[in-house]
Amino acid sequence: MFEVGLLHYMALSGLLFVMGLIGIVLARKNLIALLMCVELVLLSVNTLFISIGHAWGDLTGQVMVLFILAVAAAETGIGLAIFVLIYRASDQVDLEKLDLLKG
Amino acid sequence: MLSICIWHALVGALGLYLVPKQNISLIRLVAVVTALFGLIFSIYLYLSYDQTINQLQFIEKLPWIGGINAEYFLAVDGISVSLILLTCLTTLIICLMGGSLVRQNLRDYLAIFLIMQSMVIGVFCAQDALLFFLFWEGSLIPMYLCIGIWGSKNRSFAARKFFIYTFLGSTLLLIAVLFLGIKAQSFNLANIAGLSLDLDTQLWLFGAFLLAFAIKVPMFPVHTWLPDAHTEAPTGGSVLLAALLLKVGAYGFVRFSLPITPDASQYMAIPMIVLSLIAIVYVGFIALAQSDMKRLIAYSSVAHMGFVTLGMFGIYLIPKELAVMTFSGAMIQMIAHAFGSGAMFLAFGMMYERLKTRNIDDMGGVATIMPYLASFFVVFSMANIGVPGTSGFIGELLILVSFLKHQPWISAIAGLTLIISASYTLWMVRRVFYGPVNPNMPLAYDVTTHETGVLSIFVACIFLLGLYPKPLGDLLLTSSETVIASALHSKTGAKS
Amino acid sequence: MMSEIYTSLAGLVCFSPLIGALIAGFFAKRIGAFGAQFMTILCVAIAFASALVLFNYMYIEETRVFNYSLYTWIAMPGITFEVGFWLDRLSVGMMLVVTAVSLLVHIYSMGYMKGDPGIQRFFAYVSFFTFAMLMLVGGNNLLQVFFGWEGVGVASYLLIGFWFHKDSAANGAFKAFVVNRVGDFGFLLAMGLFVTYVGSLNFSDIFHRIPDLAAVSLGGMPLIDWICMLLFIGAMGKSAQMPLHIWLPESMEGPTPISALIHAATMVTAGVYLLVRLSPLFEFSPMIRSWILVIGATGGLILGMIAIVNHDIKRVVAYSTLSQLGYMMAAVGASAYGLAMFHLITHAFFKALLFLAAGAVIVAAHHEQDMRKFGGLIHSIPLVGVVFAIGSMSLMAVPLFSGFYSKDAIIAAIGATSLPGAHYAYYCLLMGVMVTSIYSVRAFYLTFLGQPRSNIHIHELSNTIKWPLIILAIPSMGLGYVLAPMAGNLHWFGEAIFYTHQSVTDLAGINGHLNHPGSMAMDAINSAPFILMLLSSFATYWIYRYSWAEKISKIFAPIQCLLENKWYFDWLVEQLLVPFVWIFSRAFNRVGDQLLIDQLMVMGPAKLLESFSLRIKAHISGHLYHYAILMLLGTAVLISKVVMI
């Protein structure tokens, strides 16, 4: 066994971030998946905040996380609400087909 | 005191929304009472204004935005008082007329005009550049909505053109105001005017002001939004546009260009006068060729406002005594134009209600079917032409005669308006009202008693002002002298 | 005490017609046609009576000048514009003429306008006109004169267009106003010169400062010449001098009483009155007077000639008015201001008589104005025939008739002046006498003598039409004889008229002549104007008696063509000037404003922006993940920049 250090947390956070980004870019099918990927990105930032805050002995990082969680929750709520409306209007949540802004 | 003058109309507008939408008579009552209150209040303002004192009066000063020293600073001089009176009178007339010219969303319609009254009076009272800008922009939005909602067929295009065009000018005004405010550490107009600026800076500032105000006045060649806006606007909008919004532009020249950038104004006086003369002669010719009655009146507005800018920038070319005369003439012309053009738009609105056309070729012999309306219209035409005894004459007379000794060419060219304005106005009257009745016109009834009453207010103003302009002249005189003194005071010399 | 009397009298003279007009105009429905007529006539009668009292003070009791200001119109630094009255022999005499003719025309109109639906409006307009004319005449400053000047213009516009449903009336009204405005342009500029050089528009100040003005020169021409030129341009418009006369014949579209009052007796003479009023100025501008002389005399001849070929009875009288106005102007040019006023006064009466008589013929003939359809009317309306003959003889300057004294004196005065152009003017006016006789005799013959040329059923004339004719016939015959001794005195208007020494010596002989009207009439028998008049009258009479008119017109075909086209003045305006203006305004509108400014300058950038955004728009997929990638890339670039710094 080895000691889990700051670097590992940062690596995990980076991994989550990249996964999230890839998901956002590649999730071409489903809106829900897109939303989950956005959440993943936020979580990666949270992880970073907590780990660095812990390492530096500064509570600000953890306070910030609480803020982010609140915002993320609100964001997810609104996002889901929008999806429901989209689904009601067009009977699907397929990203490929949602191109009303097409020029 | 001035705050009441400004905000009572806004309160009235909010009050309108307490009234249920269906209760039209109560809505009209509230609007008229608000406007009447404004008029009475402004008359009280006029009576308690001390004409002998040569300074700002009724000062109200509160800190507004502390960080940048912007203040809520209101005060008036004679020029402002006369324009406030005009504003209240115009709004009252529109509110009185409102119900019979607009049938849908009457509540919103009247509320918009009351809001506009607040904003316009705010412009005339503000002595703080930022506050001025706030009211200036504030008057834009109600007008945009007014054209966009109650306009005729092509309204959205006209509203957009009006908004973007005038807004373009305003952005430059904002930049100039911010620049000056930061430089003077204050947005107080008196402090800003006290800045010493070199000619280059002044020219840049003058350019920014010019674009903002010239578009609003409108001067040639940035006048083309006006015919579009006028033709599409509802009657009340047209009246207000002609009577007030154009004056706001000219007022801006008085408060900004002349005192803040006097050297640049002097430098640019000749080009400005040339543009004014073009507006008077060239636009007059254009008016002659119009086949749309409202466009014709709009173009005549441009030509008449040419006199205002001519009188304002002419002060640099003639000695001071004559300068006071020509400048007062310009201010009087502003007021007189409101009565001439505004009244014509109102009378036209009544005709449009009945005939549903703006095209002159579709009319003819209207005097036979609507003799009273025709009589009113002829009176307004005479005021528009500037027949002595009507309001339109005084300003033109004072401006024309004051140039003759030193710049006779200006008088000679501007004097052509006597012939041109008579031609286009009476040619319109001849085609619309005289001659045999056009068989294609719908059957129409003459003006009602209510409409006669409203039009009579304009007639009374036209003759009152035309036959006895001395009170107005006295009101404007000392303020004009102050403005001219600061406009002629060079700033580059002060800077070493 | 006296000043209060003057103030109230002048107020009564000027404002009572206004009150009448307002009552007739605003309470038209309530007081009805008769009420409106009664009120306006009463008010004008009051004005006339007050004018008589003033006349008594000025002429019999020898008051000199009374000048007072009613109120300050507007005050500017260095100058106050006022409204006030200037009473002297000149203005009071003119007031008397105006109110007298106006009163008679009011009465006459009761019969003439009977049954017209707009009768209250008509009387309101006529009374308003009287008011404006009196303001013009009585003003103590140029601004008030200008107020009256434009006021009569407006009244004339409204009255010419009284029957506004007729196209011709509408056009005539429009033309009259706009052409007059050309003159007003000159007037306004002249006022500007007074304001800037004298600092006042009051007559008293202006007259005091004339010696100073004489020294100033502007652009190579003496200032006084400029002022006089501009004022004369103003007078050309109002008094219908060439080439601004074109509106007067068209004004005949208005009701005939109007033609008598406005377009013969009063308004058109306002220009002459103005120049006489400002005689102290014109005396110092011989050059402009020379021009006035030439233009007036030319008009006196050639505009009268048009009347020879015209068939409309009213237009014949209108052209004769143009010709007589030319005589008055020429008299002003020759410094014979008193004689110009003399002719103005006699002309006011005999020309009003002629117009009203013509109107009576028109009423009798059921609104037929074409003389070719008349003939032999003397048998059916003898009274009208007689008064028409009296008017014509006065116009033709038959000795002892009033026109004789004023007209012959003018011709003699012009013969005596030494101004450049005086000889030309003299012969023009001498020829003009011939022309006057020809058209007068022709009009009288065609209307009243010979055989009826169409069966016109004669309409009965009412007393309100007949009595004014009879009353006007008296001054048309005798006024000249009565006034001649007064006019013989150079200073019969007191100090209102100023003469230079030169003018006094020039005019001395003529005026001596006028002092003995009886012997003047006897002497005239072997003078050139009388012989010419007699010859041409008889020649015309024989020509029509034996129907030679056709043959003669064939001989003079080119001249006839010229005259029938009114010397092509109207053609010039209608075919050249108007299309020119029209093309310009259309081009300005289409090319200048709509294309260059609106489409190119204003909508141009907007269009450019639009096409730009359309092009970009084509590359927008609308997919959310594309936006996301772009956003990420953007952030990445931003961060990398920050990191690099």
Image (spheres, grey):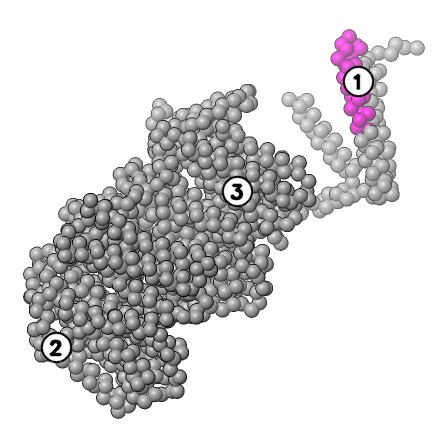
**Tag 2: residue type?**
Ala
Mark 1 or 2: in front is 2
Chain at numbered mark 2: C
Mark 2 surroundings within 10 Å by alpha-carbon count, few (fewer than 14), some (14 through 19), many (20 or more): few
The Cα–Cα distance between marks 1 and 2, rounded to whole angstroms, is 122 Å
**Where is residue C63 drawn, in percent x and y?**
15, 51
Which type of secondary structure does the marked residue at label 3 adopt? helix
What residue is shown with label 2? Answer: C528
**Where is residue B267 drawn, in percent x and y?**
37, 37
Q: Could you confirm whether marks 1 and 2 are on the same chain?
A: no
Label annotation for residue C279: none
Label annotation for residue A66: 1
**Residue at x 51% of width, y 49% of height:** B454
Mark 3 surroundings within 10 Å by alpha-carbon count, few (fewer than 14), some (14 through 19), many (20 or more): many
**Tag 1: residue type?**
Leu
Mark 2 or 3: in front is 3
Q: Pick the residue in front: B492 or C236.
A: C236
**Where is residue B226 drawn, in percent x and y?**
52, 48
- Which residue range is magenta in the image? A53-76
Residue B481 sits above or below residue A47 on the image: below
Residue C579 sits above or below residue C128 on the image: below
The Cα–Cα distance between marks 1 and 3, rounded to whole angstroms, is 58 Å
Q: Is residue A80 left or right of residue C288?
A: right
In the displayed orientation, state which residue is furthest to the top: A57
What residue is shown with label 3? Answer: B92
Chain at numbered mark 1: A
Q: Is residue B142 left or right of residue B265?
A: right
Q: Report which quarter residue C541 is drawn in.
A: bottom left
